[in-house]
Amino acid sequence: MLTHLTPTAIAALLLFLCNDWLLGPFLNPALPTRPSVISEFSALTQPYHWLFQALDILAGAVIIALLPCLVRLLQPKDRALKWTLFATVALIGIDSIVDASLPISCAPAIDTHCSSITDSISFSPHVLESLVIGVIAFVAPMLWWFAYRRSHTMIAQASKLFVLLQIGLVPAIVLARHDEAAIIGLVQRVYQLSLSAWLALILMTAVYAVQKHRATKRLTVPQPSGQLEIT
């Protein structure tokens, strides 16, 4: 089970799976980093697109598998807030699977014909899904900061920093819209790395909470001899 891994191992696994674009220069060196978006690695015309899709699906599956740990971590008295926080992480995990299941047909960064038809697919399911999860990912750290600003200091601080980073990336995104500033790939990769780091912190903290609870339970369960178990 995933919860038998150390929290550090959980974080490392999530960081790798959520940032499989790091394999891009090795598996698909023809796709340039600066002007390409991450989803282009999964485009149906690209080599190893099936591997990038599989890793994205696995990332979502791992996040979903760790959701029960959040129940141990989440302690707000407001039940509505508690389950809203739970839903933000769950939706990010589900989106990873949905996103991989809706690959784009080609890679605009290197396919000139693909570039010519991008306007006609501006409202494709893939783009719509990306917009929805973008809104969720922006609101989620605000909610986590609000809920844990007085208790889980690391989660609160990380959530605040992630919100500030997203705000700071807005000018870069606007700049990237101009043809002469082909930096959209760099901006998206910084964003994805930050999102996955924030998510990994929350889930590794949740796993630690579960493991701590199990250890405490073992120490307090009476043994047949009437003595407490200490191992």
Image: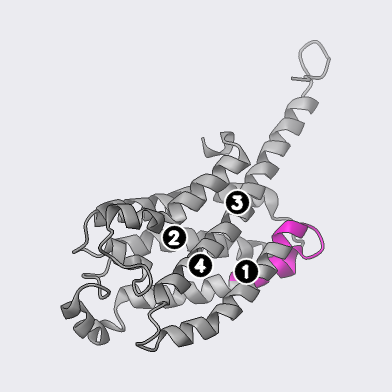
Q: Does the CB distance between marks 2 and 4 fall below 8 Å?
A: no
Boundaries of the magenta span: 140-156
Residue type of the residue flagged with mark 1:
Phe
Relative side of 108 to 83, left or right: left
- Of the residues under marks 3 and 4, which one precedes in the sequence? 4
Residue type of the residue flagged with mark 2:
Ile
| Mark 2–mark 4 distance (CA, rounded to whole Å) | 21 Å
Answer with the quarter of the image where residue 20 lies: bottom left
Which numbered disc, 2 or 4, marks the residue closer to the eye? 4
Tell me the element at label 3: helix
Residue on which disc 1 sits:
162
Q: Does the CB distance between marks 2 and 1 fall below 8 Å?
A: no
Residue on which disc 4 sits:
190
Q: Could you classify mark 2 by the number of other residues whose Cα lies within 10 Å: few (under 14), some (14-19), or many (20 or more)?
A: some
- Of the residues under marks 3 and 1, which one precedes in the sequence? 1
The answer to whether one can see residue 64 in this image is: no
Relative side of 113 to 206, left or right: left
Relative side of 150 to 203, left or right: right
> In the rendered view, would you say 184 is above or below 4?
below
Picture coordinates of residue 184, whole percent (x, y): 41, 77
| Mark 2–mark 1 distance (CA, rounded to whole Å) | 21 Å
Which numbered disc, 3 or 2, marks the residue closer to the eye? 3
> In the rendered view, would you say 135 is above or below 101?
below
Residue on which disc 2 sits:
94
Residue type of the residue flagged with mark 4:
Val
Picture coordinates of residue 54, whole percent (x, y): 32, 51
In the drawing, what numbered circle is on residue 203? Answer: 3
**Residue 90 vs residue 48, the one in the foreground:** 48
